[in-house]
């Protein structure tokens, strides 16, 4: 059996209080092993985005356990969570969230520049290598505003991988792309998963995209249903 990368137990997340209280997660439990390529499925309002936000350490649950790489993340302070997130977790969003005044390379190395407090030659070399693997060697110095939608999303994937995270969380990463670009992005994610053993959890409403993943995790009414 492979080692567990993360495990959450009986996660509850409640927003508001009193008559305005809304319970989004209702005792959700999930284990992910190292090297998984998994799709996160479920209707709007099922709790997928809240779960991703908690797994990414951007929000704490109301109650329940959250352990990743042996670290209890429910008891960590904000500084420890920020350091953990920067070192171990990468993010890919539906609308890529690139910095418009930065080049493709500058966007990719930004997470490392934040961590190190400056750009380094090693970071620039890794950024160029990642962009090359994304098929963007000829777009390294292009302003992000001059890239196509598919190219921007490939830059976003490279940025998520910049710090060699163990886990990449992707929230509808192909939702804003045409079918050809979506397939290309998923093929690249699959290649990185195979070559580097990076774990991916990909939230999607697209059954064809989900079918390219080796595991499908279904969330409904705040719990894992399949």
Image (cartoon, rainbow, N blue to C red):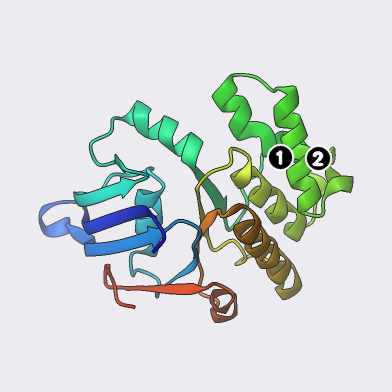
Q: Residue furthest top?
A: 117
One can see residue 137 in this view: yes
Local crowd at mark 1 within 10 Å, few (<14), some, or many (≥20)? Answer: few
The N terminus: image quadrant? bottom left
Q: Nearer the viewer, residue 42 or 188?
A: 188
x 65%, y 19%: residue? 118
x 21%, y 60%: residue? 22
Q: Is residue 26 above or below residue 71?
A: below
The C terminus: image quadrant? bottom left
Q: Mark 2 points at which residue?
A: 143
- Left or right side of 78 for 168: right
Residue 8 quadrant:
bottom left
Residue 105 quadrant:
top right
Q: Which residue lies furthest to the left in this view?
A: 18
Badge 1 marks a residue whose secondary structure is: loop
User: Which label's residue is closer to the chain start, 2 or 1?
Assistant: 1
x 53%, y 48%: residue? 91
Q: Which of 191 and 39 is in front in this view?
A: 191
Distance from Cα at disc 2 to Cα at disc 1: 7 Å
Local crowd at mark 2 within 10 Å, few (<14), some, or many (≥20)? Answer: some
Q: Residue 100 carries which label?
A: 1
Q: Position of residue 163 (x, y in %)?
A: 59, 37
Q: Which mark is residue 56?
A: none
One can see residue 101 in this view: no
- Left or right side of 69 for 146: right
- Left or right side of 137 for 8: left
Q: Position of residue 37 (x, y in %)?
A: 52, 65
Q: Position of residue 171 (x, y in %)?
A: 51, 59
Badge 2 marks a residue whose secondary structure is: loop
The answer to whether the residue labelled 2 contacts the one labelled 1, judged by CB atoms less than 8 Å apart, is: yes
């Amino acid at each position: 059996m492979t080692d567990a990368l993360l495990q959450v137990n009986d996660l509850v997340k409640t927003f508001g209080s009193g008559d305005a209280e809304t319970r989004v997660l209702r005792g959700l439990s999930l284990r992910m092993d190292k090297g998984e390529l998994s799709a996160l499925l479920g209707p709007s309002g099922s709790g997928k985005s809240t779960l991703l936000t908690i797994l990414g350490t951007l929000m704490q649950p109301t109650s329940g356990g959250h352990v990743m790489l042996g670290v209890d993340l429910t008891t960590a302070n904000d500084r420890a969570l920020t350091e953990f997130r920067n070192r171990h977790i990468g993010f890919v969003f539906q609308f890529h969230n690139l910095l418009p005044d930065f080049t493709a390379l500058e966007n990719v190395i930004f997470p490392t520049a934040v961590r190190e407090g400056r750009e380094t030659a090693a970071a620039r070399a890794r950024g160029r290598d990642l962009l090359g693997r994304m098929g963007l060697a000829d777009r390294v110095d292009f302003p992000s505003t001059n890239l196509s939608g598919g190219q921007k999303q490939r830059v976003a994937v490279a940025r998520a991988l910049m710090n060699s995270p163990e886990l990449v969380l992707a929230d509808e990463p192909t939702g804003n792309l045409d079918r050809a670009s979506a397939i290309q992005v998923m093929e690249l994610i699959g290649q990185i998963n195979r070559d580097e053993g990076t774990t991916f959890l990909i939230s999607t409403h697209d059954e064809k995209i989900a079918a390219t993943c080796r595991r499908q995790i279904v969330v409904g009414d705040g719990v894992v249903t399949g």
